[in-house]
Image (tube, helix red, strand yellow):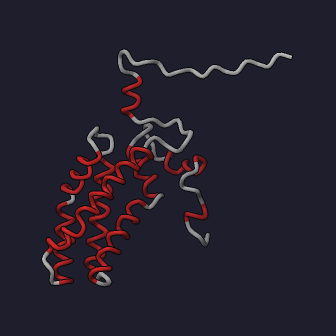
C-alpha cells in the first residue's frame, strides 16, 4: 500500500464501515463515533489548523509546543465527542470540553511561554475562539457519525428511547408497490 488509508478505503462508504462497526457492542456507542472521526482525521485536522495559526504569528513551533498542542487538541476533541449523547447543546459541550482540558492547556501555555517569552494569556486569546469552534464542529460531526453511514441501521440509544417512549407514534411502514396488471 503506497497511498495509505485514503486509497485503501473510502471513509464515507458504507462498505468500508465494517472496521468501525466491528468495535460496537451496542449500536450508537461513542466508540463508533470516535472511530469514524479518527478515520476522517478530525482531531489531526484541528491540531494542524491550530498549529498553522500559531506558526503564522510566531514561526515554526518547537517540539515541546508541538507535543503540548497535539495533547490539547486531542483532549478537546475527545472530551467533545464523549459528551455528544449528554443531551446538552453544542455550545455547552464545547465549553465543558474546553474547561475539562485545563491541564493540557496549562502544559501548552507553559511550553508557549518558554518558547516565545510571551505571557500564556496571549496564546489563550489567540486560540480560545478557534478551539471552541472546533469543539462545536466535533460535536456536530459526531452527532451525524454516531448514526452510521448513509443507509446504516445503526441508531443512537437516545433515538431508541424516543421510539420506545409511551405514546410515541409507531414508525411508518413502507407499503410495497402493487404489481402492474397486464
58 lies left or right of 17: left
Looking at the image, which residue is at 45% across and 35% down? 155
Horizontal and vertical percent position of residue 88 = 26, 41
Horizontal and vertical percent position of residue 171 = 49, 22
Q: Nearer the viewer, residue 141 or 31?
A: 141
Horizontal and vertical percent position of residue 59 = 30, 84
Q: Nearer the viewer, residue 58 or 17?
A: 58
28 lies left or right of 14: left
Looking at the image, which residue is at 42% across and 48% down? 33
Q: Is residue 150 above or below residue 110?
A: above
Q: Nearer the viewer, residue 169 or 81?
A: 169
Q: Is residue 176 above or below residue 111?
A: above
| Quadrant location of the C terminus in the rendered image | top right
Looking at the image, which residue is at 31% across and 79% down? 55
| Quadrant location of the N terminus in the rendered image | bottom right
78 lies left or right of 19: left
Picture quadrant where residue 98 is located: bottom left
Horizontal and vertical percent position of residue 96 = 21, 51
The total number of labels drawn is 0
Amino acid at each position: 500500500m503506497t497511498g495509505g488509508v485514503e486509497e485503501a478505503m473510502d471513509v464515507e462508504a458504507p462498505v468500508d464501515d465494517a472496521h468501525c462497526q466491528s468495535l460496537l457492542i451496542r449500536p450508537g456507542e461513542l466508540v463508533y463515533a470516535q472511530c469514524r472521526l479518527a478515520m476522517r482525521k478530525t482531531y489531526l485536522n484541528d491540531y494542524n489548523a491550530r498549529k498553522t495559526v500559531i506558526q503564522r504569528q510566531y514561526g515554526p513551533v518547537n517540539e515541546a509546543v508541538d507535543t503540548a498542542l497535539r495533547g490539547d487538541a486531542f483532549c478537546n476533541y475527545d472530551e467533545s465527542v464523549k459528551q455528544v449523547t449528554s443531551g446538552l447543546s453544542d455550545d455547552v459541550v464545547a465549553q465543558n470540553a474546553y474547561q475539562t482540558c485545563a491541564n493540557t492547556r496549562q502544559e501548552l501555555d507553559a511550553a508557549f511561554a518558554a518558547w516565545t517569552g510571551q505571557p500564556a494569556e496571549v496564546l489563550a486569546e489567540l486560540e480560545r475562539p478557534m478551539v471552541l469552534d472546533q469543539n462545536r464542529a466535533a460535536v456536530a460531526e459526531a452527532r451525524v457519525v454516531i448514526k452510521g453511514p448513509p443507509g446504516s441501521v445503526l441508531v443512537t440509544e437516545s433515538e431508541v428511547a424516543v421510539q420506545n417512549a409511551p405514546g410515541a407514534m409507531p414508525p411508518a411502514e413502507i407499503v410495497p408497490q402493487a404489481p402492474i396488471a397486464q
